[in-house]
Structures are given as C-alpha cells and as structure tokens.
C-alpha cells in the first residue's frame, strides 16, 4: 500500500576518481502500489544501485526518492523507520544468516522493530509459510539446510518485518527450476496477501514475464522501457535489439510474425502462445 | 566403440558422505555411464540430485565407495593408484567451479593462469608461452595484468578456464560454473568451452540446471536422486517433459509449447529445441492446414 | 632486491640521530616520491590512516623523555626540550618509514612479486625446515582475498542494516552487539571460501613447494647494483652526519 517514486535520480560511483561510473542518470519512475514490478537489465545497467537507493542504503547524487510522496532523506535520523517500511533482500541473502536456529534468524528483523514475543512468533510462522518452509525446519540450524532452503529462510526474515514495499535483488539467482518457482510464487503470494508493493530485480526476462505485473527495463543507467507486461513485451523487438534476453517464446513469436503468421504483439508465456496457435491450427 | 574412444567409464558407481557421527549418507546409488573422448555432455539435475558429487568423483576430489571408475585410462578404484597418478589425472581433467571468487589464487590474472603449470614444475619459458596461449584462447589477453577482483563474473570464469587450459588438459568439467553468472557471462563461458570442444576436440562435461545450456550439448544425462534418470540427445531427453518436471527440472519454452499443443490435440511432429526449428515446425503445420482446407 | 633495499632504508631511518641526518632523510624521501611519480594525494591518504599512531608516539615521546633543559612544567608533567626534539624526530621517522615502505613495496611492486621476494629471502631458513613456501603462499592468498572479504563485509552490513540493525548509535556494548550479525556470517563465509579455494587448488595440482617452478624468475640487473651502491652511500652519509654531532643529538 505504498507508492515508490524516483524523481530525476542520479547516482555516480567513485565520484572524482578516474573510475567514475554513472550508475543512474536522471531516472524518473513510479512503482505502483500493490503490484509486482520487475526491474530488469544487464549487469551494470544501474538496477542494483536503484535497489540500494530505495531503502536509503545509498543516497542519490541528485533527485529524490519518495515513499508515498515523502522524501526518504528528509529526516536521515529516521532512516531505520524507512528501512522497516521498505524491506530489502540483497543478492545471495543466505550468507547473512547467523542465528542458531532458522526461527531466531527470521525473528531478528521483527525483534529489531521492538515487537512483542507473541507478535514476533506469529510473524515468523506466517513468513515461513509464504516461502514454503515447513514448521519443523524452524528449529534447525541454518547450516543443516539446503541452499534453496537457506535462501527461503533469508527472504522470510525480511517478509517477517511485513514491509509495505518488499524489494528483492535477484531472489532466484543460481537456483534450480523448482527452487526458483517456489520462491517467486512465495513472493507473489506475499504481495497479494498483504497488499504490499513488490519490486523484483532480475536479469531473467523469462521469470519476470511469468511473475510480474509491471516491468521496468534499465539500459545504460536510464529507464529504457516501463509499463505493464503487455506494454513492455509489445516492444519485444527493441528489447532484443539492445541485447536483452527476451524469453525464447517471445523470440519464437517474433520469428513467426516475420514469416507472416498473424500473432498478437505481446507473447511472453508458453500458455499465451499455445492459445494463439490453437485457434490458428484448429 | 573401442575401449580407446571411451574417456570415462563408470559402472555401478556408489558414493556416500560420511556424517560426523559415522553414519553414511548415500548420494549416488549406482551410476553407470560411458563418455567418449571429445564428447560434449551436459549433466542435468536439481540441487542436491548428486550431479556435482558425480563431477567431483571424476578427478578424485571425492573417492567412490564402490563400483568401477576409469577416467582417461586410469582406474580410479585401483588400490595401486599412486599420488603421482592422482596429479597426472588432475592435470588432464580440469575443473571449473561455481563461485568465480573462490577459485582464483593470485592477485594478477596472468599469475593465476600460471598457477597450474607452476605446480606441475613446467620450465618458466614454457609457462609464459602456455599462459599467453591460454589467455588468447579465452579472449582475455588484454586483461593479463589486471586484478581478478575487478573483473566481471563471466571474465573471472574465463580466467579460471584459462588456468585449466595452461595445464594442457584433455577434458574440462564445469561444475555449475554458470550458476552465479548473468546471461552475458553465461554466454561467454558456454561459447568458450564449446569452442574448445569443437576446435581442440576437448571432452567437455557441464554440470548445470539451465535447460538452454543443456540443449546445446551433444548429449544430456539427467541425474535424479543419485540415479541416472535419462540419457540421450537433447531432443530425446526434452521429448519427455513430464519426466523432467517430476525431477524438478524444466524444458526449453519451445519444447514446452509443442508439448502443450499436443495436449490440446494438436500434434506437431518432432521435438524442437531451437527457436528456428520450432518456427519451421509451426509454419509447416499451418501450411498443411491451409492446403487441407483448400482440398476440402 | 627491492625488499633488501627497503630494509636497508628502514635501518637507515633508525640510524638517524641528529638534525642534519634527519634533513637528509626527509630530502631523500621527497626525492624518492618525485621519482616514483605516485600522486601525492594517494601517499597522503596512506599517511592519514596512520596519523593516530604517529601522533600517539609523538606525544608519548614528548611526555616521557627526560632531559636537562626543562621547557615548562604543568601539574606533574614536565616537558623538556629533549622531549620536543625526540617527538619531532619520531614523527619524521615514522612518516618516512611509512612513505618509503609503501613507496618501495605496495605501490610499485605486484603482491606476487613481493611474496616471491620474501620467499627467496627467507629461503635459507628452509635448511632448518621452516615452511617458507607455505608462508609466502599464505601471504599471496591473504592479499588476494582482502578486497573480496571487504566487499563481502559491506554487503553483509547492508543486509543487516536492512533488517534494522543500527550501527551508528547506542553505547559501546550495544555497538559491539551489533557486530555479531556481521562477524558470524563473515567468518562462516571465510571458511566456506577457504574450503572451496583449497579444493580448487588441489584440482590445479597444488602440492606445496615441492617440484614447483615459477613463471617469473627475478634476475638482478645492473641498475639493481647501482641502487644498492647508492643505498650504502646513503647509509654512510647518515652515519657521518650523526658523527658531526651538530645541534642536538639524541
């Protein structure tokens, strides 16, 4: 239930050194409340920087980051409160687990918020359920879990703070197809159940096509395309032209259209392609 | 196939991890598999299926519990295997691991590439030559004097491949070497090893859970729960999507599309792997339908 | 070779005992800086890092050197002229020390060459069965992983900040407590990295220093001997100036 807005945001790495890199260049963007937005782009397109700006880990060089219309840097002393409202899951979050049990680790965030024990334990169970961690796993040490389970525990640790905006940087990186689906489905479910705004950063167009409502495409520190899935994928040709990996099925649709097969503009899931071709072939 | 062509021969290979309390946790329950010299094999499986364990047996990072395992003409289960045999094996079977940060030893790219041949006691001038060649092969010559930690993931993995090449191996094993990379890095690494396979005839085994990578290999072996579930060309393997899904895997989207259409009663003949194949298949079906309508 | 030179230079800095020889020392350091063409900003930054140590030693010298000429006394603290001198000397000495070592070694030598040098210098100790090669290897790996682990620390800190850890406020105990969620994951990750690296090294046929060769064999050039000669002259000059005993001598 919170809107995130970037207003003319710029960010430069290593300012004043010969290695100066413009990570974000005058980026303006509104992430709609209560929807799942995917931010996609090459490594170095500025997407990971954007994530750290959203919860005030980094300060923009120019421009403003707004949460429900209010500049998050208005009162820097209050940043901790902002970080509870904008939950961030970093890349490979399993490496931040440190408590003796999974339960204690998931409870770490809520405890820092100063919640009472009853509420904490309620939230831990709820968060574990979102990511599909069985209750009996909660008493185990993080080191007895598989890689995929650890990842899920770490994500649950942020979900348990019940942030109004949940931001995840590459939540499915390196996981096998099953692990990937469990996590992305859990994240969508969190958004739907709590009404929170969800932002997923990824370089997998296929995953974004399957799990996001809106998509923002970053290219060379700027917003290249932004809109609903349909809007963005109707520019599939342009996406491919800047070297972004459009889903194989979108490639196929582009190829078929070139050969004169009448298909709609935006095809990005196997189901959509199946339905279109069924009517053509029957 | 003569014995000479077989590069890896495994029969009833069993492996079990030993827990701290002495209990054995079986991981591989009898793998039987022959891989030919110069073959390009993808080993697919979900996390924890045992696919990485299999890779680590091939150059004796792990020792098999029982069964037969012959790699590059050396019987790895023989009790007479000496330490020198072990090093000769590791020189020949190079490994690239998942985390690019945890396998580079030196602070300068070319020093790292030299690490393998230095360990082998190769004369300095020869090392220099090999390092230059290896960096050339992976297209990283321009970065010879760079610090590895400033490179991209894909570049680091190419340095790791160069480090293996400088030992003059006959086989390269990628143990989920692309799992932590972005699509660009993944492409760099895959294209590099494919070139080694095609141009130098090197045996390439890639352990992965990316279907699109497996689709490019000559042969796909699917390991599930420590057993070989499927073994064949990518086309043969991907023609059974249900079996793959049950093993926690996927098929390329084009293959999935053809399968989804067949479930709706529209059967297209064949299992397309690439986008072009799939487009051809669909166009042909549309053509046939048009002709059929005209005839009727 | 560079290593020997810098050790000699360090010995010289400790030999300096009067104003003149210190002046020579400073002059030589400035000259070296100019020759090396390292941006002064970077050098100053490395000095700043050790500023505290430098000031601390200077103040200690100031306060605890007893001399004949008392400058002033305050409460029970007596400051002598000798103390002032020795404090200034100490300051210059440390400064030059830092400048010269960083100049000779870190900025102009690759870490690998450095560990190679250490290894060859220490190699006589191999006779008494000291693991010289292993020591050098450890140094290389440590140098290789410093940037990686620093990056990792940063990441873990950010991740825990995102979970509401506050590193910047609270008392000492609270701050120390806030370090636990960083240190534990960092240790675990360092162990995991060590494990994986060991495996990767084994795969690349590493078996210690036995039968190992080097891509880069360091040879001594004529210029190295010239440098050595100059260094010996420099040392002699320092000793001579000390003898003169002009002005103040320690």
Image (cartoon, coloured by chain):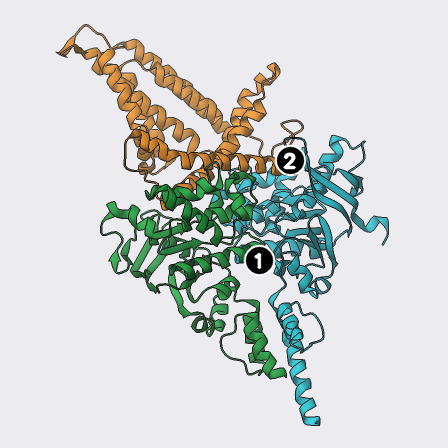
Chain colours: A green, B cyan, C orange
Q: Mark 1 points at which residue?
A: B187
Extreme residue in the top direction: C68
Q: Name the residue under label 2.
A: C202
Query: Is A276 placed above or below C249 here?
Result: below
Say left or right for B272 vs B80.
left
Kindly identify which chain the residue marked by label 2 belongs to. C
Residue at left offset 47%, top offset 28%: C223
Quadrant the N terminus of chain B occupies? bottom right
Query: Is B54 placed above or below A176 here?
Result: above
Neighbours of disc 1 within 10 Å: few (<14), some (14-19), many (20+): some
Residue C110: tell me if it is visible.
no
Residue A244 at x, y percent in the picture: 49, 64
Residue A80 at x, y percent in the picture: 30, 46
Kindly identify which chain the residue marked by label 1 belongs to. B
State how far apart marks 2 and 1 are (Cα).
27 Å
Q: Are marks 2 and 1 on the same chain?
A: no
Neighbours of disc 2 within 10 Å: few (<14), some (14-19), many (20+): some
């Amino acid at each position: 239930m919170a809107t995130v807005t970037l207003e003319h945001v710029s960010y430069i790495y290593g300012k004043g050194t010969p290695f100066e890199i413009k990570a974000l260049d005058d980026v303006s963007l509104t992430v709609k409340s209560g929807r799942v937005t995917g931010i996609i782009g090459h490594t170095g397109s500025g997407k990971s920087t954007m994530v750290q700006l959203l919860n005030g880990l980094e300060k923009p060089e120019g421009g403003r980051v707004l949460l429900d219309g209010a500049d998050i840097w208005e009162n820097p002393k209050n940043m901790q409160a902002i970080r509870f409202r904008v939950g961030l899951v970093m890349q490979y979050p399993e490496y931040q687990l440190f408590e003796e049990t999974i339960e204690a680790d998931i409870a770490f965030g809520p405890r820092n918020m100063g919640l009472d024990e009853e509420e904490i334990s309620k939230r831990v169970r709820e968060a574990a359920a979102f990511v599909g961690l069985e209750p009996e796993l909660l008493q185990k040490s993080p080191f007895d879990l598989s890689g995929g389970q650890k990842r899920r525990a770490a994500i649950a640790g942020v979900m348990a703070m019940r942030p109004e905006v949940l931001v995840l940087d590459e939540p499915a990186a390196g996981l096998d197809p099953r692990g990937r689906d469990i996590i992305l489905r859990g994240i969508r479910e969190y958004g739907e159940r709590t009404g929170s705004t969800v932002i997923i950063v990824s370089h997998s167009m296929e995953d974004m096509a399957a799990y996001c409502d809106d998509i923002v495409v970053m290219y060379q520190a700027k917003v290249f395309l932004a809109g609903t899935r349909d809007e963005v994928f109707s520019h599939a040709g342009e996406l491919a032209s800047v070297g972004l990996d459009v889903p194989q099925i979108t490639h196929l649709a582009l190829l078929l259209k070139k050969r004169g097969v009448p298909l709609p503009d935006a095809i990005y899931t196997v189901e959509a392609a199946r339905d279109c071709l069924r009517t053509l072939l029957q | 196939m003569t014995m000479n062509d077989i590069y890896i021969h495994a029969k009833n290979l069993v492996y079990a991890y030993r827990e701290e309390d002495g209990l054995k946790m079986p991981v591989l329950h009898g793998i039987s598999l022959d891989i030919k010299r110069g073959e390009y094999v993808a080993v697919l499986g979900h996390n924890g299926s045992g696919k990485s364990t299999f890779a680590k047996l091939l150059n004796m990072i792990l020792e098999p519990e029982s069964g037969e395992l012959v790699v590059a003409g050396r019987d790895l289960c023989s009790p007479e295997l000496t330490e020198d045999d072990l090093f000769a094996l590791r020189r020949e079977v190079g490994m690239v691991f998942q985390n690019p940060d945890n396998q580079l030893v030196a602070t300068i790219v070319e020093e790292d590439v030299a690490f393998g041949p230095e360990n082998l006691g190769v004369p300095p001038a020869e090392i220099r030559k090999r390092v230059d060649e290896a960096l050339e092969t992976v297209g990283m010559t321009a970065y010879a004097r760079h610090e590895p930690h400033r490179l991209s993931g894909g570049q680091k993995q190419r340095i790791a491949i160069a480090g293996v090449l400088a030992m003059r191996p006959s086989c390269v094993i990628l143990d989920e070497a692309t799992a932590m990379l972005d699509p660009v890095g993944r492409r760099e690494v895959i294209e590099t090893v494919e070139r080694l396979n095609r141009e130098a005839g090197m045996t390439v085994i890639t352990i992965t859970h990316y279907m699109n990578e497996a689709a490019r290999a000559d042969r796909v072996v699917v390991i599930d729960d420590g057993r070989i579930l499927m073994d064949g060309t990518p086309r043969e393997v991907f023609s059974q999507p249900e079996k793959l899904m049950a093993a926690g895997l996927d098929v390329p989207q084009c293959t999935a599309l053809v399968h989804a259409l067949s479930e709706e009663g529209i059967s297209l003949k064949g299992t397309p792997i690439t986008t072009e194949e799939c487009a051809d298949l669909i166009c042909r079906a549309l053509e046939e339908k048009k002709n059929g309508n005209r005839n009727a | 070779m560079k290593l020997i030179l810098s050790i000699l230079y360090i010995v010289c800095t400790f030999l300096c005992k009067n104003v003149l020889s210190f002046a020579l020392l400073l002059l030589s350091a400035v000259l070296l800086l100019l020759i090396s063409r390292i941006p002064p900003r970077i050098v100053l930054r490395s000095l700043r890092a050790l500023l505290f140590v430098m000031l601390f030693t200077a103040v200690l010298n100031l306060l605890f050197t007893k001399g004949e000429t008392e400058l002033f006394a305050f409460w029970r603290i007596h400051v002598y002229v000798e103390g002032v001198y020795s404090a200034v000397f100490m300051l210059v000495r440390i400064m030059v020390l830092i400048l010269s070592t960083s100049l000779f070694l870190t900025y102009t030598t690759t870490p690998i060459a450095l560990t190679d040098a250490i290894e060859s210098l220490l190699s006589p100790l191999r006779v008494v069965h000291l693991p010289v090669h292993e020591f050098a290897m450890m140094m290389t790996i440590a140098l290789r992983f410093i940037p990686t682990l620093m990056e990792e620390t940063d990441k873990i800190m950010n991740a825990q900040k995102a979970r509401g850890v506050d590193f910047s406020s609270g008392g000492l105990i609270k701050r120390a407590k806030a370090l636990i969620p960083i240190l534990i994951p960092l240790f675990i990750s360092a162990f995991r990295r060590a494990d994986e690296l060991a495996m990767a090294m084994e795969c690349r046929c590493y078996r210690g220093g036995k039968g190992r060769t080097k891509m880069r064999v360091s040879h001594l050039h004529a210029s190295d001997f010239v440098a050595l000669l100059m260094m010996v002259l420099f040392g002699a000059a320092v000793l001579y100036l000390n003898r003169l005993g002009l002005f103040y001598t320690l």
